[in-house]
Amino acid sequence: MDGNEVVLSIKDLHKSFRKGDGELVAIEDFNLDIMDGEFVCVLGPSGCGKTTLLRVIAGLEEPTSGKILLKNKEITGPGSDRGMVFQEFGLFPWRTVRKNIEFGLEIRKIPKEERKTISDRYIDLVGLKGFEMSHPDELSGGMKQRVGIARALANDPAILLMDEPFGALDAQTRNLMQKELLRIWSEMKKTVVFITHSVDEAVFVADRVVVMSARPGKIKSIFDVEWERPRDRGGVEFASLRKKILAELERETVSNR
Amino acid sequence: MKSNAFGRLRKLLSRDSERGLMKSAAIVLVSLVAFVLVWWALSSIFPSEYFPSPYKVGVALVDSFQNPDPNTGVTMWQHMSKSLVRFLLGFALAFVIALPLGLLMGFFKIAENFSRPIVEVFRPIPPMAWAPFFFIVAGVFWGPIMPVLLGVFFPVLSNVIFGVKSVDPLFLDVAKTQGADRLTLFKKVILPSAIPYLMTGIRIGLGIGWMCIVAAEMIVAFGGGVGLYISVMSQVGKWDYMFAGMVVIAALGILTVEVSGYVERRVSKWMGMK
């Protein structure tokens, strides 16, 4: 990671929803610059607006005020320049693994041979060789999310947005997928924004952990994690940072009562 | 009810183990034999020309296929083909109109707001209530077809609308982040996810369609039809032949439901949705 070019810039972001007569403030005064190739985790208690943040970046929600710049261009709606990975996978059950991965390429009218070359590459990258013709209901949760990641990467987006991507997986698969994601990330050199509520997960994968406060969602603190990967979950450093972040989160939950 | 029982029967038959298969086949056989026995016993206890024994109905059934019936002048084969042609035409027309209309109404709020009141006015009218009108307006050929069209139309329409509206919002989000515009969303997400609902609409429509064609033919039909046959046989007092006609209707009904079930399974397998 060179870390000197800003890929994504969130400026004074404010997002609120109408709720009955009142209004629910989901995100307030949010400012963040994300560097090229950086792996940023956004961590926060449930209902803190972290998923909303990701959906605004993806263009699925409009900001109430403020703006988000992707490579200096303001985001105005969804687009294939941002690849999104969803917690519940969202694979089309009527499409095979290959056809799911080629969905975005199909939309962009990329010729069939070229689509196949691209999907082959990503099927290989996520370790799904031999499952090209399978349908999603024949895959395990971990394999489904491998398809989800390959599909998001197939469009060669400037940034990968991941919304609790391993939240629906069992603990063992989750740990494996974190390692797999780091392998893919180091091969692809993509910028990643990763939403999670697991401190352990955030410390294991991220270059930077952004801790959000609950309602309204603001940045509470940012932790840099500068150690080499793979990180040792049992190590002293890991434990102490984990403890620090947990304390930060706990104060957040208590002060919110 | 018929299709439910048959579905369970098929399930019983489709069990993997050979022993289980033998056992279920035996149960099916016993059930059918028991039915015929009870029928036979009842017709012996209450002897009546209105209630012929299974044997007499069987003889009449065979005869109806072999020899043209003197009252209508044709064999059961011709009655069957007449009914099937009417049924298929009515079904095809209903499908061709209901599918695009359902997609539009499900997708565009304005299309729904416009069409919903009209649909709701027509839906409660039993298709058969239209029969006299259609015989006058549409003639002897299209007359009996129109009630079938109506009977199939509404279940297909409402299931397609429901299917379009039931599309998983997650799928729409996924497609949008992949760069899909509205037309692409419609073609590549909404349409495929509405297909299972369409199949349900078709299955319900098939059942109603059969009831409509028989009833419509009983009112007026020219040149044959199983409904006409049943009605004529009752008028001339050939009760065993009337029952034979009912057996043919039951068999045709089971056949169509089976065919649609087969198509449904093939489509869902092809789509990867088992």
Image (tube, coloured by chain):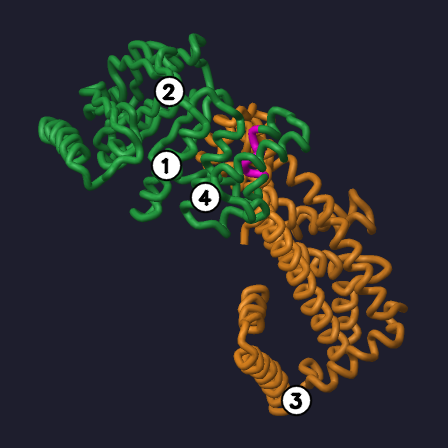
Position of the N terminus of chain B, as image quadrant, is bottom right
Q: Which colour represents chain A?
A: green
**Could you tell me which secondary element the residue under label 3 belongs to?**
loop
| Chain to which mark 2 belongs | A
| Residue contact between numbered discs 2 and 4, judged by CB atoms under 8 Å | no
Could you tell whether A233 is left or right of A55 in the image?
left
Per the image, the residue denoted by label 4 is A144
In this orientation, which residue lies closer to the viewer: B181 or A164?
A164
Residues at marks 2 and 1, common chain? yes
Check disc 3 and give the amino acid type. Answer: Pro
User: Rounded to the nearest whole Å, what is the CA distance between mark 1 and mark 4?
Assistant: 11 Å
**Residue A208 or residue B45, whichever sits in front:** A208
| Numbered label attached to residue A165 | 1
Mark seen at residue B47:
3
Marks 2 and 1, the one that precedes in the sequence: 2
Q: Which residues are magenta?
A: A99-104
Residue A201, quarter of the rendered image: top left
User: Whole-percent x and y of residue B226?
Assistant: 77, 65
Q: Amino acid at mark 1?
A: Pro
Q: Which residue is mark 2?
A: A1
